[in-house]
Amino acid sequence: MSAASGPEPRPIAATIAAVIRDGQVLLVRRANPPDAGLWGFPGGKIDVGETVEAAAVRELHEETAIHGEARHVFTAVDAFERDEHGHVRRHFILIAVLCRWLSGEPQAGDDALDARWFDLAGLENADLAMSFGVAEVARQAHALALSESEAAPTEIARRNQGSHR
């Protein structure tokens, strides 16, 4: 690295909010790079001092008007913004957070061109221009949400048992 070329670019930490509701996944059509014009999860850069979970919930609301609750960090994916020669201009590490829908209906805001629910079952067959890995991350989020909902009655029963001692 030379002084004239400046410091070597570093990956940028960002978060994506995976929200599953009634067999559907919430996606936004991105307005800005990387992946401008493609469908992906609501998300964005993590602010200094902000937790991954707080960033996911903030970005979810800013881009979709949906109120959510962060449940679990469950995977991370790389997203690259390249120049016209294919060189990496920016490298984002997108940390996926499963979020539970609390209220609201999708309304595009901030840097989203559109926001809506899509059926999980037909996501891969839909004629959607999606960011790389969206269908796979949606499947992972759905599996985690299902396991969480199946565990919930057991956890409630365990807590109730403990309170009657």
Image (cartoon, rainbow, N blue to C red):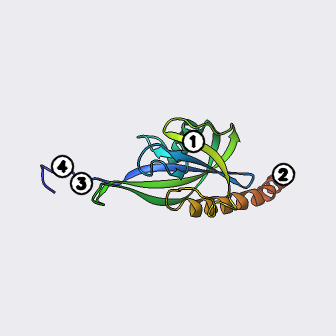
Q: Nearer the viewer, mark 1 or mark 3?
A: 1
Which residue is most to the front?
127
Instruction: Estimate the spatial distance between the alpha carbons at disc 1 and disc 3, rounded to whole Å.
Output: 34 Å
Say if 56 sits above or below 87 in the image. Answer: above
Instruction: Estimate the spatial distance between the alpha carbons at disc 2 and disc 3, rounded to whole Å.
Output: 55 Å
Tell me the element at label 4: loop
Q: Nearer the viewer, mark 2 or mark 4?
A: 4
Pinpoint residue 114: horizontal percent, then vertical percent. Answer: 57, 42
Tell me the element at label 3: loop
Pinpoint residue 18: horizontal percent, then vertical percent. Answer: 60, 52
Q: Which mark is residue 160?
A: 2
Q: Is residue 111 rendered to the left or right of residue 24?
A: left
Question: Mark 4 sits on what residue?
Answer: 6
Question: Mark 3 sits on what residue?
Answer: 8
Question: Mark 1 sits on what residue?
Answer: 114
> In this view of the protein, which residue sits in the foreground, 57 or 135?
135
Say if 76 sits above or below 60 in the image. Answer: below
Say if 93 sits above or below 48 in the image. Answer: below
Q: Nearer the viewer, mark 2 or mark 3?
A: 3
Q: Residue at x 47, y 42 (%)?
A: 31
Pinpoint residue 116: horizontal percent, then vertical percent. Answer: 64, 45
Instruction: Estimate the spatial distance between the alpha carbons at disc 1 and disc 2, rounded to whole Å.
Output: 43 Å
Labels 2 and 4: the sequence-earlier one: 4
Pinpoint residue 104: horizontal percent, then vertical percent. Answer: 68, 36
